[in-house]
Amino acid sequence: MGTTAAADPPLADDVAAIRAFSRFYTGILGVLDEGLLETPYTLTEARLLYELAQQDDLEVVELRRSVGVDGGYLSRLLSRFHADGLIRRTRSVADGRRQVVQLTKKGRSAFEVLNGRSADQVGGMLASLDLDQRRRLVGAMNTIESLLGEVEPRDMVVLRPLGPGDHGWIVQRHGLVYAQEFGWDETFEGLVARIMADFVDERERDPKRVAGWIAEIAGEPVGCVLCVAKDATTAQLRLLLVDPMARGSGIGGRLIDECIRFARRAGYTRLVLWTNDVLTDARRLYDQAGFHLTEENPHHSFGHDLVGQTLALDL
């Protein structure tokens, strides 16, 4: 028996939810107040100042396209700016029919006040959130931008904490990628499964000293790393992986940096990891991050003769 359209959420419900969020967020930022950020400028005027501050000068046609306002309304706003001494107007050298606008010293000063107050406002809003909450917030905003804007989804890389389903993904992807690229057998996947089980137990006992991250592109996991406790003062980086489809985009370095930052905040003084000599790409990333080789030992594991390498980084 087939399903019917009634199983899908009504479009009107989604429209109402988005409008409710818009009211909520504009209320937080105070963008509907008569004077934005306790200045004499409206939201549209502040946007004009921002666009003009990004370049030495800007044609009115380009300014209108960037801000997306009616031509007559834009003309009135620019006339006010000119009367207040915020801008100067000239004619384009390339086309005398086009008008060029640039900020004066007074106009740039007005922009700097707005820009500074905006940064302070957002910083204050984020101050009550911890690192994981901030990451979730930024990731959600990146998702909105990639779905509704002109940003290519593949360019939007988000790092977030592990959630439901991620632990199984880590085990599955490690088993598959290492089998395809190095011919490692199922005993490696079994090892990864045990590491993940230990990770879940350790994080339950002491979440402030144990963490893990997933890298996402367009909502799909493409990389991971864990940071666990080896002893009271030493943390261990484990299970770094970047999916082959996402390599070359800097994700591996970002995951390593995130692990290092967490280890420092958690109070560890040293970060170690164990890798194998055949993993040359990962070794290059570790070297770039400042790790140094402390020990090498040959071993036979996962169906192959390998050389295990222990690396360390003083924090």
Image (cartoon, grey):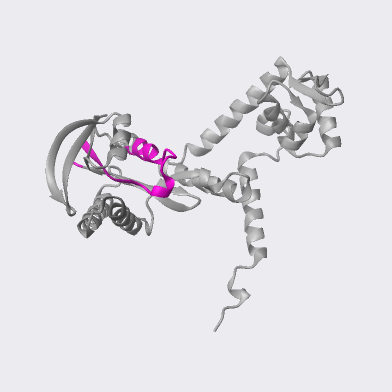
In this view of the protein, which residue sits in the foreground, 91 or 261?
Answer: 91
Q: Which residues are magenta?
A: 230-259
In this view of the protein, which residue sits in the foreground, 294 or 6?
Answer: 294
44 relative position to 310: left or right: right
255 relative position to 37: left or right: left
The image quadrant of residue 96 is: top right
Q: Is residue 244 above or below residue 114?
A: below
Look at the image and tell me whether residue 28 can be seen: yes
Q: Quadrant of the C terminus?
A: top left
Q: Quadrant of the N terminus?
A: bottom right
The residue located at (70%, 41%) in the rendering is 32
**In the image, is residue 249 part of the stretch drawn in magenta?**
yes
Q: Is residue 306 above or below residue 268?
A: below
Look at the image and tell me whether residue 233 can be seen: no
In this view of the protein, which residue sits in the foreground, 256 or 135?
Answer: 256
The residue located at (77%, 20%) in the rendering is 87
197 relative position to 64: left or right: left
Q: Position of residue 144 (x, y in %)?
A: 58, 49
